[in-house]
Image: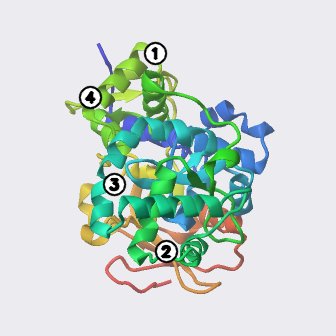
Amino acid sequence: MNATINHADLLRLRMRAQGLAGSGAGSSAASATKSGSSRLSGPEKIAATASRMLAMQGQDWRSSRWALGVRTPGTTVADVYAAFNEALVVRSWPMRGTIHVVAAEDIGWMQSLTNHRVLAGAPKRRAFLGITDSLLDRLTETSLAALANGRSLDRDELSAVWTEASIEWQSAWRYHMIWWLCQNGLTVFGPQLGDSEPRLVLAEGWIRNPRSLSGEEALAELTTRYAAARGPIRRKDLAWWSGLTLRETDRGLALATEAGRLVPVSLADDADTLWVEPELLESVGQASTTAGWHLLPAFDEHLLGYTNRDAQLSPEHFERIVPGKNGMFLATVVNSGRVVGTWKRGAGKKGPVNLTPFPGERVKPDAVRPEFERWAGFYGFDDIPLSLADPHSKHPVG
């Protein structure tokens, strides 16, 4: 018979798994122990967080930097940059056709496991864009030649190479071609200059120690590590997050359960079975570890890691996080694991950070300030004002 957890347990376990337990604590004690973080350099700590999370939303480059930092206490944005420049982490498309930040060693086996679904629709997309097979070959060969011998390119530089090669390309082609090169494991976004996005490089040579996993071994690894970094998860969470079929999802859960790497649990008043890492489940009944405030970035895994987010966010507030349901998740103010508002930095070097609580929620700047200062310290910002906005207005009130 499955163990039973309540809804408070679910939230606590998810926060611990996410590395968000405690007020401004970043990585939980358990994850710090696993990564041996006390012995690691700053960039290595960032890479350990990326590895523990398996893959983190990366379409918004600025947000993904703090997603790493908030889970890695004592690091700065310079450590994130160094982790990229030291080839410890990369930015690419591991699954679902969505760009993520991934530990460099993991990107290859993840793509091998998930590519059969995302690549299947590529020919139809190229037909719509007008990219013939011969053009695809020429664009690919030209791109790879330009990246040879350790060279890196940003997006504009890559398309300039096509122009120099007398290829009459169209603007809509660039995203598809970069995706195609990365999705096939030919390239990744690796080195980073200034505060700009990482630059495109050849995967071979940049990734020094790729892991080699395939078949059921890879399926069990993805299933286990996804659940270990998200807390109790549902079958449909895994299927959506990974982009795998329900049949593959069920097999992954069965493999992980048979190996003792995950255990099924029941949620009170809920018919769904959830799966959780046994070590994490042992923390049920311990003192609450969700207390405290967090300023989480846009597109954070705290919400995007699941299909059912009710534990973290009241459904009636969903449109305040994703205005117009346009897929653009805003940065969130979180108290004791629950989303209670949004936050945004104003324009300019000294632009204020404005907190906008949900109606009926109380957000006090003094309570948020320690986490705000941790965010500012991560980026090296000085004298940034912190303001509270009226939830019924777009204007800050103090």
Q: Amino acid at mark 3?
A: Ala
Distance Cα–Cα, label 1 vs label 3 = 38 Å
Seen in the picture, residue 171 relative to 248 is either above or below; the reply is: below
Measured Cα–Cα span from mark 2 to mark 4:
43 Å
The answer to which of 150 and 321 lies nearer the viewer is: 150
- Which residue is disc 1 drawn over? 260
Q: Which residue is identified by label 3?
A: 122
Query: Mark 3, mark 4: which one is toward the viewer?
Result: 3
**What is the crowding at mark 3: few (fewer than 14 residues within 10 Å), some, or many (at least 20)?**
few
- Mark number, residue 102: none
Q: Camera-side residue: 118 or 42? A: 118
Chain-order first, disc 2 or disc 4: 2
Q: Please give the residue where the numbered disc 2 appears in the rendered image.
A: 167
Mark 2: which secondary structure? loop
Report, in whole angstroms, how far the alpha carbon at label 1 lies from the one at label 4. 20 Å
**Residue corresponding to mark 4:** 247
Quick one: SS at disc 1? Answer: loop
Q: Can residue 367 be spotted in the picture?
A: no
Q: Position of residue 88 (x, y in %)?
A: 69, 47
Vertical placement of 41 versus 256: above or below? below
Residue at x-position 46% and y-position 69%: 174
Q: Amino acid at mark 1?
A: Gly
Tell me if residue 320 can be seen. Answer: yes
Depth order, front residue of 139/55: 139
Q: Residue at x 65, y 46 (%)?
A: 204
Left or right: 157 as drawn, with respect to 335: right
Total labels: the figure holds 4
